[in-house]
Amino acid sequence: MSFQNPVFIPGPTNIPESLRKACDMPTIDHRSPLFGQILHPAREGVRKVLKSESAEVFIFPSTGTGGWETALTNTLSAGDKILAARNGMFSHRWIDMCQRHDLDVQVVETPWGEGLPADRYEEILTADTNHEIKAVLATHNETATGVKSDIAAVRRALDAAGHPALLFVDGVSSIASMDFRMDEWGVDVAVTGSQKGFMLTAGLAIVGFSAKAMAATETAKLPRTFFDVHDMAKGYAANAYPYTPAVGLLNGLNEACTMLLNEGLDNVFARHSRIAEGVRAAVGAWGLELCAANPSVYSDTVSAIKTPEGFNATDIVTHAAEKYGVAFGVGLGEVAGKVFRIGHLGSLTDVMALSGIATAEMCMVDLGLDIKLGSGVAAAQDFYRGNTASVQKDAA
Ligand SMILES: *Cc1c(COP(=O)(O)O)cnc(C)c1O
């Protein structure tokens, strides 16, 4: 593996030099006003990225998975009913976590490649007249399949049913890369991590709690210690953590938020969308298909690309690493061996994306797939040439 090539895995993502520098800092007293000067702006920056006026932002030394646990354990009690759909490996793992916490999950099995079935959610919530369902889980961007779901539609389903359940959204591979509107969508807990849209190394679980989610913490009985948001809030009030914070990463997060907000969230989303369109143009030129069932669910952060029947898609990933020193994502779970993934989120330009497309193409030709060298690159080039309007602005 070369350290010079960008990675094309859907997280961890490429780290901009300025963020690497921001993370590299001397030890400071992590219970001091100086630490507060890093912590509070970082939380404020995250709140803006979440598009929330009033969310309580908590940042744990952990990963996105710890963010899932934070959402569940602070707001729920054993035996509580949860509604969730399984349409990929990440939604599956969150469901598994619920079950291991003795939550009673009603699982809507959904074909991998499709988005969350908001209409089924509405039927189930409408039928739950006693309001036994306490929370609805929604994976905004299923990283395993490259499928985006419509969170506004899930909110509408809750509202149409007049149901008071909390709405928890896994935005680990969407937040800071794809449009996310915590307040507008009535999200009660938003979950992400540091190593995807925020362009840092793994190490932080980042969550936003709505006022309603904070109220639920008062009665929730699931055991929690490390992820207790009340302990965390008490720490924050004293410019500290209940334990030792990852100070360098928090400094990086603060800088990452500044970068994202300076670029402008809409520009960040447009850049991801443009880069993703180029990748999709290449996939089409290769004569291949996405795992994502239709354009309305295409993810702007990761493309899961189906390879022909009888071909092991994982060979592309292995070959790319061994021959070209480039990382792509393997298929996970049900789609293992059937898809390979190009991650196109975080710190990425059109030109970097072209190098990934070119490498994938070389690998597929090397491995005997019937693909014309240069076809995908040309399709992406054509798209990028015609859609460069905001590139200069991005770079600024
Ligand atoms: C990466 C990812 C996770 C898991 O996050 P970790 O930081 O690896 O714990 C959860 N959900 C989605 C959608 C992801 O992409």
Image (tube, rainbow, N blue to C red):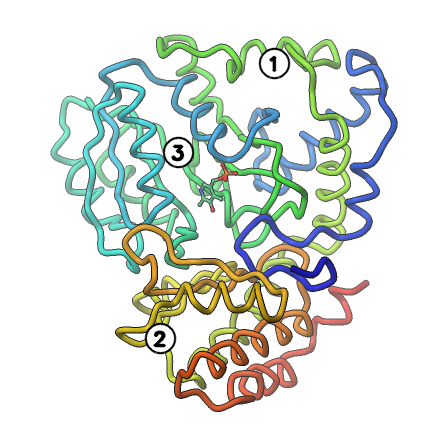
Judge left or right: residue 20 versus residue 305. Answer: right
Q: Amino acid at mark 3?
A: Phe
Going from the N terminus, do you reach mark 3 or mark 2 first?
3
Residue 316: percent from left, percent from top? 46, 69
Which of discs 1 and 2 lies nearer the camera? The answer is: 2
The disc at residue 168 is 3
Looking at the picture, tell me which residue is in the foreground, 325 or 273. Answer: 325
Q: CA distance from mark 3 to mark 2?
A: 31 Å
Q: Is residue 6 above or below residue 30?
A: below
**Which residue position is annotated with label 1?**
233
Is the residue 87 above or below the residue 324 in the image?
above
Q: Residue at x 80, y 20 (%)?
A: 35
**Residue under the image location 49 percent in, 27 percent down:** 210
| Front position in the image: 369 or 229 | 369
Dot 1: within a 10 Å radius of its alpha carbon, few (fewer than 14), some, or many (20 or more) residues?
A: some
Q: Are marks 1 and 3 in contact (CB under 8 Å)?
A: no
Q: Residues within 10 Å of mark 2 (few under 14, many from 20)?
A: some
User: Closer to the N terminus: mark 1 or mark 3?
Assistant: 3
Mark toward the viewer: 3 or 2: 2
Residue 88, percent from left and from top: 32, 50
Judge the density around disc 3: few (<14), some (14-19), many (≥20) Cα neighbours within 10 Å: many
Position of the N terminus by quadrant: bottom right
CA gap between label 1 and label 3 equals 20 Å
Give me the residue at 85% from left, 22% from top. Answer: 27
Mark 2 is on which residue type?
A: Glu
Q: Which mark is residue 289?
A: 2
